[in-house]
Image: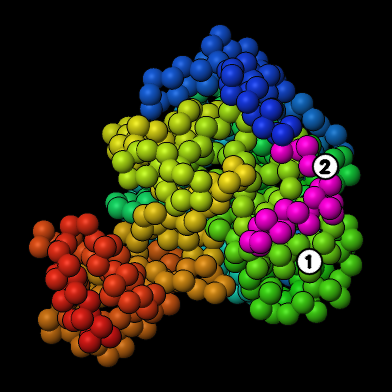
C-alpha cells in the first residue's frame, strides 16, 4: 500500500473518523459549481457594503469584475464594524519586547495615519509603497491606505536598492512609508538609507514618511516626515470604493522581465480572503492565530492582515527569524502565548527537523489545535514529522496551495466546512467553485496520477485583475498557453481526486518559500562591471527547497580573482540578501541554442547532477547533439 493510501486508512481511524466527509465535500462543491455566482454572492454578504452590487460577475475573458456596482472599503470591514477591546495583534520583537494592540487601538492608529496621508494630498487611486519591517506599523500603513482609497504596494524589507527602484517606478508611487530601520538577527537593517539611495532614481515620489523603529537620529530632508508628526488623531472617513477598484499591487517574479505588479481588487479579494480564512482556519473567539509569513509577501497580506482581521481574530506577529535569538524561540512563543493555530512554511519545518526534536518537545505545545503549510510543496516525510512532533498525532494539517495571483488559497483542506481525511503532501481538493484541472501540453485533461499543468478554468473572486499597466502581458503570461488561467505549476490528481502539487513548470524559483525571478538576479549580476553575461538556475536544497546557482561569463580583461565574493556582495546591495546565489560558476560561455536562447534546463540539470540522458529531451529548441556538446563543454568547465 502506498504511503498515502495507508495514511488515509489510518487517519479515518484516528482524528478524522468520519468517512462520509469526502462525499459531503464533493456534494458541497457540486452544489456550488452549479451556480457559482449565487454561491459567492452569499459569501460576499458576510461583508459590509456601503452599496450592494448590481451584478455578481462581469466576465470579459480574461478580465473579471466581481460585485459590479457594489461599494466597499477594506479598512471599514476590518476595523469599524468590529471595534472593541479584543487584541487584534500580539507583536513580539526580536529583543523580546511585546506590544498588544486591540481592535480599538488599531482603528485609532489607522485613522490617524489616514488623516496624515490625506493632509499630504494623497487621494483615492494614488499608489503608496510601503517598505517596513515586521512591526505593527506595517498593517497599520496598509489599512490607512485602504481607508482613503490609495493603492498600497508593500515591498519586502529584505529587498535592496534596485529592487526598490523597479517596484516604486513601475507603480509610480506618490509616497513611500518606511522606518529608520529594522532588526534582523540582532543587526540593524537601515531601511531609510537604502530607500534614500533608491529615491535618487524614483521621480514619482513626493513624500517619504518615516516611522522611528530603532530610534536613530534622523536628519529630515525636504519632503520627508516622521510618522508621528503627520499622524493626526481623529476620525477619517472610509472612502467608498467601487468593488473592482484596486486595493493593492504586489510585485512578484516571473520567468522573464522585471517583477510584475499583480493587481488585486477590493470586493472580490475581501470576499475570498474572508471565506477562505473561515473555511481553512475556522478561527474561534479564543484562538491565538499565528501565520509566520512576512507581510512583504502575499501570504502575509491575506493571512496576517485582511483574512484574520475580518474574522476578528487575535493575530500573533513575530519580528525575528525562526531561530533567533534562540533556536527554540518559536516554540517558546507558542507556549507562552497559548498559540492555537500555526501556519508556516516547509522550509521552516525542514530547518527545525534538522535542529532536533528536543528543542520542540521541551515546550508545552498543548494549546495548538490546527497546523498549516504554505508556499512550497511539503514533502511527505516533513508532513509526517510536523504531524507527529508538533501535532502529537492529534492535530490536522492544512496544506494550502495558492499564488500571489490567486489572492488566497484555492486548494486546501477545509476544517471550517468539513475536514476530509488527509494525505501527507496533498492539499486535497479545490475550494468550492474553483474549477482546477490538470492538462497535458496539448491542453487535454490527463488521466489520474499523471503529471501535467495546473489550470483554473473559471474566474473566481480574488483573482488578479491584471498586471499593473500591462494588460497585454497579463494575457500573455496567464492566458496564452491554454484557454484557461495557467498557474505555472505542475500537479497531479490521484485516484481519489486529491491534488498533488509537483513544483513549478517554469523557471520561477522558490528559495526558502520566497518567490524569486531568474531574470531579476541575472540583470543584477550583469550590472556588475566585470560581468558580460549571466544565467541563473537552481538546484534542490534539503532545507530551502531550492538554492540559487549562477553562471557568469566575465568581460575580457577582467580577472576571476575575488569576483565571486564581490558578486555576492553586489547582489546583496542591489536585490537583497535573499537573492544571493549559493554557488556562482565562472564559465567561458553559456550554453545556447543556435537562435541564441540560453539552455536553462540544461543548466538546471547539470547543477542537479542529472545524467545527460535526462537532459536531451528538456530543451525544445535545440538538437540532441547541440545539447550533448554544450553539456560536455560545461561539465569540463566546472
Ligand atoms: C508554490 C505563495 C506546493 C507554487 C502563496 C505556486 C505551493 C507558488 C504551495 C506561488 C503548496 C504555494 N504546495 N506549492 N501548498 N503554495 N506553492 O506567489 O509553486 O509566493 O505557484 O504565493 O508557490 O508563490 P507565491
The colour scheme used here is rainbow
Q: Position of residue 415 (x, y in %)?
A: 76, 41
Nearer to me, 175 or 362: 362
In terms of sequence position, does the residue under pointer 2 or pointer 1 come before the other? 2
The answer to which quarter of the image holds residue 465 is top left
- The quadrant of the image that shows the N terminus is bottom right
Q: Position of residue 280 (x, y in %)?
A: 71, 42
Q: Residues within 10 Å of mark 1 (few under 14, many from 20)?
A: few
- Horizontally, residue 236 falls left or right of residue 613, namely right
Nearer to me, 45 or 457: 457
Residue farthest toward the front in the current orientation of the protein? 1
Residue farthest toward the top in the current orientation of the protein? 54
Residue 41 visible somewhere in the drawing: yes
User: Vertically, is 612 above or below 478?
Assistant: below
Nearer to me, 412 or 332: 412
Tell me what residue is drawn at x 54 percent, y 11 percent.
55
Q: Secondary structure at mark 2?
A: loop
Of marks 2 and 1, the one in the foreground: 2
Q: Secondary structure at mark 1?
A: helix
Tell me what residue is drawn at x 21 percent, y 64 percent.
598
On the image, numbered disc 1 is attached to which residue? 388
- Horizontally, residue 195 falls left or right of residue 542, namely left
Tell me what residue is drawn at x 37 percent, y 38 percent.
444
On the image, numbered disc 2 is attached to which residue? 18
Tell me what residue is drawn at x 47 percent, y 35 percent.
456
Residue 469 visible somewhere in the drawing: no
Q: Position of residue 80 (x, y in %)?
A: 74, 28
Q: Which residues are magenta?
A: 1-22
Amino acid at each position: 500500500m502506498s504511503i498515502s493510501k495507508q495514511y488515509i486508512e489510518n487517519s479515518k481511524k484516528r482524528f478524522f473518523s468520519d468517512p462520509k466527509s469526502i462525499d459531503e465535500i464533493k456534494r458541497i462543491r457540486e452544489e456550488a459549481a452549479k451556480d457559482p455566482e449565487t454561491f459567492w454572492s452569499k459569501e460576499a454578504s458576510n461583508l459590509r457594503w456601503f452599496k450592494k452590487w448590481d451584478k455578481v460577475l462581469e466576465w470579459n475573458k480574461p478580465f473579471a469584475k466581481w460585485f459590479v456596482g457594489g461599494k466597499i472599503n477594506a479598512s471599514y470591514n476590518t476595523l469599524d464594524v468590529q471595534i472593541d477591546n479584543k487584541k487584534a495583534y500580539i507583536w513580539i520583537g526580536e529583543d523580546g519586547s511585546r506590544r498588544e494592540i486591540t481592535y480599538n487601538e488599531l482603528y485609532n492608529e489607522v485613522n490617524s495615519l489616514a488623516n496624515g496621508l490625506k493632509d499630504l494630498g494623497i487621494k483615492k487611486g494614488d499608489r503608496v509603497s510601503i517598505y517596513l519591517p515586521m512591526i505593527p506599523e506595517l498593517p497599520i500603513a496598509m489599512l490607512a491606505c485602504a481607508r482613503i482609497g490609495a493603492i498600497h504596494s508593500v515591498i519586502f524589507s529584505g529587498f535592496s536598492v534596485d529592487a526598490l527602484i523597479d517596484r516604486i517606478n513601475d507603480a509610480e508611487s506618490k509616497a513611500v512609508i518606511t522606518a529608520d530601520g529594522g532588526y534582523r538577527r540582532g543587526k540593524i537593517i537601515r531601511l531609510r538609507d537604502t530607500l534614500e539611495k533608491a529615491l535618487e532614481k524614483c521621480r514619482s515620489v513626493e513624500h517619504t514618511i518615516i516611522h522611528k523603529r530603532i530610534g536613530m537620529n534622523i536628519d529630515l530632508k525636504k519632503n520627508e516626515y516622521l510618522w508621528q508628526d503627520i499622524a493626526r488623531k481623529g476620525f477619517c472617513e472610509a472612502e467608498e470604493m467601487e468593488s473592482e477598484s484596486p486595493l493593492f499591487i504586489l510585485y512578484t517574479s516571473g520567468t522573464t522581465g522585471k517583477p510584475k505588479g499583480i493587481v488585486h481588487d477590493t470586493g472580490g479579494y475581501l470576499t475570498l480572503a474572508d471565506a477562505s480564512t473561515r473555511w481553512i482556519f475556522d478561527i474561534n473567539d479564543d484562538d491565538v492565530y499565528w501565520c509566520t509569513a512576512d507581510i512583504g509577501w502575499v501570504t502575509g497580506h491575506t493571512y496576517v492582515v485582511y483574512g484574520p482581521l475580518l474574522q476578528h481574530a487575535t493575530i500573533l506577529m513575530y519580528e525575528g527569524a525562526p531561530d533567533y535569538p534562540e533556536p527554540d524561540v518559536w516554540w517558546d512563543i507558542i507556549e507562552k502565548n497559548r498559540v492555537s493555530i500555526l501556519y508556516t512554511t516547509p522550509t521552516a519545518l525542514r530547518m527545525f527537523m534538522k535542529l532536533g526534536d528536543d528543542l520542540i518537545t521541551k515546550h508545552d505545545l498543548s494549546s495548538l489545535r490546527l497546523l498549516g503549510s504554505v508556499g512550497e510543496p511539503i514533502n511527505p516525510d516533513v508532513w509526517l514529522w510536523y504531524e507527529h512532533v508538533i501535532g502529537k498525532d492529534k492535530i490536522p494539517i492544512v496544506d494550502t496551495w495558492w499564488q500571489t495571483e490567486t489572492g488566497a488559497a484555492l486548494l486546501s483542506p477545509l476544517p471550517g466546512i468539513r475536514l476530509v481525511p488527509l494525505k501527507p503532501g496533498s492539499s486535497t481538493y479545490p475550494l468550492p467553485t474553483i474549477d482546477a484541472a490538470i492538462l497535458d501540453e496539448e491542453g487535454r485533461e490527463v488521466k489520474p496520477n499523471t503529471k501535467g499543468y495546473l489550470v483554473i478554468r473559471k474566474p473566481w473572486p480574488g483573482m488578479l485583475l491584471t498586471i499593473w499597466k500591462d494588460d497585454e502581458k497579463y494575457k500573455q503570461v496567464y492566458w496564452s498557453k491554454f484557454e484557461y488561467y495557467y498557474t505555472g505549476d505542475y500537479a497531479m490528481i490521484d485516484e481519489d481526486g486529491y491534488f498533488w502539487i509537483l513544483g513549478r513548470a517554469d523557471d520561477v524559483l522558490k528559495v526558502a518559500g520566497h518567490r524569486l525571478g531568474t531574470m531579476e538576479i541575472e540583470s543584477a549580476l550583469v550590472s556588475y562591471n566585470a560581468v558580460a553575461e549571466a544565467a541563473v538556475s537552481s538546484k534542490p536544497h534539503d532545507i530551502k527547497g531550492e538554492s540559487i546557482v549562477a553562471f557568469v561569463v566575465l568581460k575580457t580583461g577582467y580577472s576571476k580573482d575575488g569576483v565571486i565574493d564581490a558578486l555576492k556582495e553586489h547582489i546583496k546591495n542591489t536585490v537583497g540578501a535573499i537573492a544571493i546565489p549559493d554557488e556562482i560558476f565562472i564559465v567561458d560561455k553559456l550554453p545556447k541554442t543556435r537562435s541564441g536562447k540560453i539552455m536553462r534546463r540544461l543548466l538546471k540539470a547539470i547543477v542537479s547532477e542529472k545524467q545527460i540522458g535526462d537532459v536531451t529531451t528538456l530543451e525544445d529548441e535545440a538538437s540532441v547533439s547541440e545539447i550533448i556538446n554544450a553539456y560536455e563543454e560545461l561539465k569540463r568547465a566546472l
